[in-house]
Image (spheres, rainbow, N blue to C red):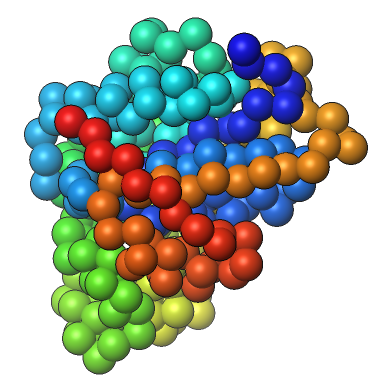
Amino acid sequence: MVTNSSPVGVFDSGIGGLTVAHEVMRQLPHESVTYFGDTARVPYGPKSPETVRRYSREIASFLADQGVKALVVACNTATAHALPTLRESLTMPVIGVIEPGARAAVRATRNGHIGVIGTVGTIKSGAYERALRAIEPSLRVTTRACPLFVPLVEEGWIDSEATRLIAEEYLAPILREEVDTLVLGCTHYPLLKPTIASVLGADVRLIDSAEETANETAAMLQQHCLAASTTAEPSHRFIASDDPLMFLQLGQRFLGDAIESVEVKTLG
């Protein structure tokens, strides 16, 4: 039975969504989190929309069986392709990462020219362009797929010379277009933020949607009368579909001691 003390479910194609989970845990310190990283099937970006929807339904069903009270889709590709389907099929509240990120970018831009980088699937979907222009139709939006960033993060190559060279290649068109705000349209990308910032320079503001998504998660829980008591002691679970040791090692880079062990659950 779902109660106010039930956990918030968070899922991603891998470890990148831990950036969102971390922010939820920071802003909502009394909420428990159950996180699922689909490390066996990462990356989602090159996969077809139907495949991403199928994976997302499987994960959502698993997390529902674990008793989560709300679902945060901490994956831009899954948000782009599966959010409407999940909202229709689930009885719990569901939030994605694209609209919160778009709102933060519109607030940040000074010249009205916003760049978006993401996986092939997210960029092809046009979801960020639609979300941005729904807020401000006059915006200029430049997009760029950066498919190698996710496997680089998953391999732990956060600050290698190879990663910097690839970033320079990917971001050259963004520099030429003179955007002043760049949306990191994949939850893995904040782990590469120092490299991306170094390549683009101090004049380009980087937006990751984790903080805004956590804000909206708090509002969603209040709206549905699902917020945990301020005296509740949180309990967090981390589940991966493959390679829990790698997940644990990378996860501790941005969750520290909050992640002590990783369970394994294979889906599909």
Residue at point 62% right, 52% down? 23
Report the side of 39 relative to 7 (left or right). Answer: left
Residue at the image position 42 percent from the left and 71 percent from the top: 249
Residue 214 falls left or right of residue 245: right
Which residue is outermost to the bottom? Answer: 161
Q: Position of residue 44 (x, y in %)?
A: 20, 44
Number of marks present in the image shown: 0
Q: Is residue 169 or residue 36 the one in the foreground?
A: 36
Q: Residue furthest right?
A: 231
Q: Position of residue 91 (x, y in %)?
A: 49, 8
Report if residue 262 is visible in the image.
yes
**Nearer to the camera, 197 or 256:** 256
Residue pictured at 35% horizontal, 47% vertical: 264
Q: Quadrant of the C terminus?
A: top left
Asked which quadrant contains residue 226, the reply is top right
Residue 127, above or below 171:
above
Q: Position of residue 64 (x, y in %)?
A: 46, 21
Determine if residue 110 is in view. no
> In the image, is 204 to the left or to the right of 218?
left
Q: Quadrant of residue 184?
A: bottom left
The quadrant of the rendering that contains the N terminus is: top right
Q: Residue at x 66, y 39 (%)?
A: 32
| Whether residue 260 is situated above or below residue 99 in the rendered picture | below
Q: Position of residue 39 (x, y in %)?
A: 27, 52
- Residue 208, relative to residue 47: is it above or below? below
